[in-house]
Image: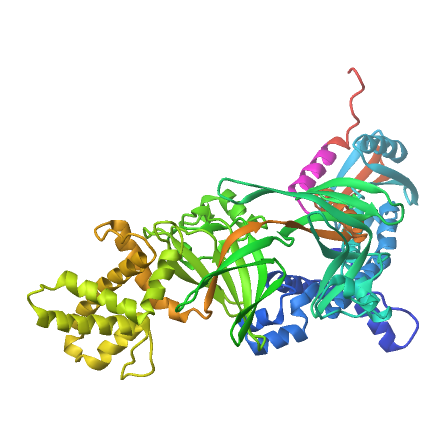
Amino acid sequence: MTASADTHGYVPRHGRASWRHAIELLSSMRFSISLLTVICIASVIGTVLKQHEPITNYVNQFGPFWAVLFLKLKLNAVYSAPWFLLILAFLVTSTSLCIARNTPKYLADMRNYKENVREQSLKAFHHKAEFDLAGEPPQAGAERIGRQLARMGWKVRLQPREVAAGTGVMVAAKKGSANKIGYIAAHSAIVLVCLGGLLDGDLFVRATTWLGGKSVYAGGGLIADVKPEHRLSSANPTFRGNLVVSEGTQSSTAILSQSDGILLQDLPFAVELKKFTVDYYSTGMPKLFASDIVIHDFATGEKTPARVEVNHPVSYKGIQIYQSSFDDGGSHVKLRALPINGGGKSFMVEGTIGGSSQITNGSNQMTLEYTGLRVINVENLSDAVAASGSATDVRRVDLGHALTQRLGAADKSATKRDLKNVGPSISYKLRDAAGQAREYNNYMRPIDMGDGVPVFLLGVRDSGAAAFRYLRVPADDKDSMDGFMQLQAALHDPAERAQAVHRYVAKVVDPNRPELAEQLTVSATRALDLFAGAAGTAAGPRTAGLQAVSDFIESAVPAGERERAADVLLRILNGSLFELNAVARQAHGEKPLNETDDSTRQFMTQAVLALSDAPLYPAPLVFELDEFTPVQASVFQVARAPGKNVVYLGCALLILGVFAMLYIRDRRLWVWLAPGDDGSHAMMALSSNRKSLDTDREFEQLRRSLPAAPPAHGA
């Protein structure tokens, strides 16, 4: 247990040999250190590996084999795993036995002056000295030395001894005995911290599920519909869960996440959210989360107003209420549905976040699920980072970035962060009749990505573990998607394609050369049909976009002429698409764009890329956020943690113990005074639990000051 203690444990005198060996192992220091090492390794795993994630996240990140292994070993929930709690319990038992076995010896050693040491033993010490006290008999010399040591802070005891030459005196002194308290306090701290961890962990929750007939709930639906066997009593001595409360509503049921589902924790009060406040920096990052709440006590009916902020929790009846995050509380949204591939008319649809609407197209029926509204989106628009379109979640404090900005120069990133608030976004799912769904995330306003033309980002992903892939739709001169949608609808209309080809040929070919006009008409028609997906190639199934043009060139043009043919065909395609855009605008009563304007060229360049990628968009409709009425919800963490004070006490004892062991030196001093011819002969020895220069200096000071009597006061 300590540097001076035996590493072996306590061995009972009675009982079978196996029992005695088990007790000895359990109470030994080597067993405690082994358990502590395993706990440290498990804690590292629990820190590196994200805890309580859905199983699909582990499968996507590590593969099926390792994901199953992690779940079997409960590495996805290390701190609540039975084996972790068992190791923690064994560590508490082992360390407690070590303390119980060694504390009586340490306390006895603190009281003991060890005055019975023999004269010959003093000669074996490293720090030793001999001197004569002329004219001072042993008793007088011992009393004088004792008084000197007492003034120096030593505790002294005198022991007369009869020897052959007469009566000698052993002066035994001690200083720094509180060093032993450091060992006791430090090891007691380990026990208290582990006990606090057991109290505030999942031990009581697990015990309730095992012994109280409770079970984890793995289904869905409303909280009010969950059966009592999945609910924990409000008298539960320890828990930690999340409580989501929308503005204007109240809730009294916390959600405790488990590896295989959830448990519901009933609270002795209800939390009503009056108002949620969030303040932002100029970059759009949040600087303050605050919730004005009213606590409704079920027992007394009392209503207690309070304000919860980040790092400023509210305590009520032993339950701490922390501001954890915020979410949508059922905002009302109005979406505009735009056909993304082909004809059709736009229409409006309204709903509430968390709800759904039925969308039908003849026999094809889909369910539109409103999953999220984010009023603030902070994007890093610097260089390549902006291309990923990944947003910073402003619902949580970006602690990593805050720390990075305050660390030394060696940690600074060379990549510049250009954080901007790009406005609201809507997230939704489109679920087909078979139950399969994809998730979509569309921004309300166009975003300038640095290439000269603002674009609408239309995101899609197949699962929650995947990243969003974004289709970039260029904004027209009215900052809307209407111009692009009109162009795309015209691309899928054979009559408008033919009209665009006619306009293009008439613009670039001399009317006196009808043979060239006929050839160019055929080429332009072929280019638009390929791009629209209205013409097949010999290379394979029908495609669209630039890929279709590429497939046609590879199948119809010799290898040596492909580069020149591609250049000609793309110039024809770009010119035809410009005229097609003019046809579409005129059909909607708008003037054609100015061909010489830079903004027009940038719009058409991005439009060609978007038209090429649009056939890959997996939905027939794009839902654009038109209007919204936000309703905030505050996410609180509620915790009853009786082990917190135990852990605080353990931390205080640990600090006390470490300082006592490091800064208090346990020293023992013996001075043997034997009768001499002219007074007495003294032999002095000093021992310390730690060799240091301070010990050497202290011994030299004693060796010089003790032989001679101090001068009288005023001499």
Q: How is the image coloured?
A: rainbow
Placement of the C terminus among the 4 image quadrants: top right
Lateral position of residue 447 relative to residue 116, left or right: left
The question of residue 231 being in magenta is answered with no
- Above/below status of 4 relative to 341: above
- At 23% from the left and 79% from the top, the residue drawn is 554
- At 29% from the left and 60% from the top, the residue drawn is 581
Lateral position of residue 205 relative to residue 345, left or right: right
- Note whether residue 180 is visible: no
Prevailing SS of the magenta stretch:
helix
Lateral position of residue 392 relative to residue 687, left or right: left
Residue that extends furthest to the left in the rendered view of this protein: 512
Q: How many marks?
A: 0
The quadrant where residue 373 appears? bottom right
* Residue 18, position as x, y percentages in the image: 85, 77
- At 84% from the left and 65% from the top, the residue drawn is 10
Placement of the N terminus among the 4 image quadrants: bottom right
Q: Nearer the viewer, residue 263 or 696?
A: 263
- At 79% from the left and 59% from the top, the residue drawn is 265
- Note whether residue 582 is visible: yes
What span is in magenta?
A: 691-704
Lateral position of residue 715 relative to residue 447, left or right: right
- Above/below status of 366 relative to 353: below
* Residue 339, position as x, y percentages in the image: 43, 65
* Residue 447, position as x, y percentages in the image: 41, 51
Residue that extends furthest to the top in the rendered view of this protein: 714
Q: Nearer the viewer, residue 649 or 146?
A: 649
The quadrant where residue 63 appears? bottom right
* Residue 623, position as x, y percentages in the image: 49, 61
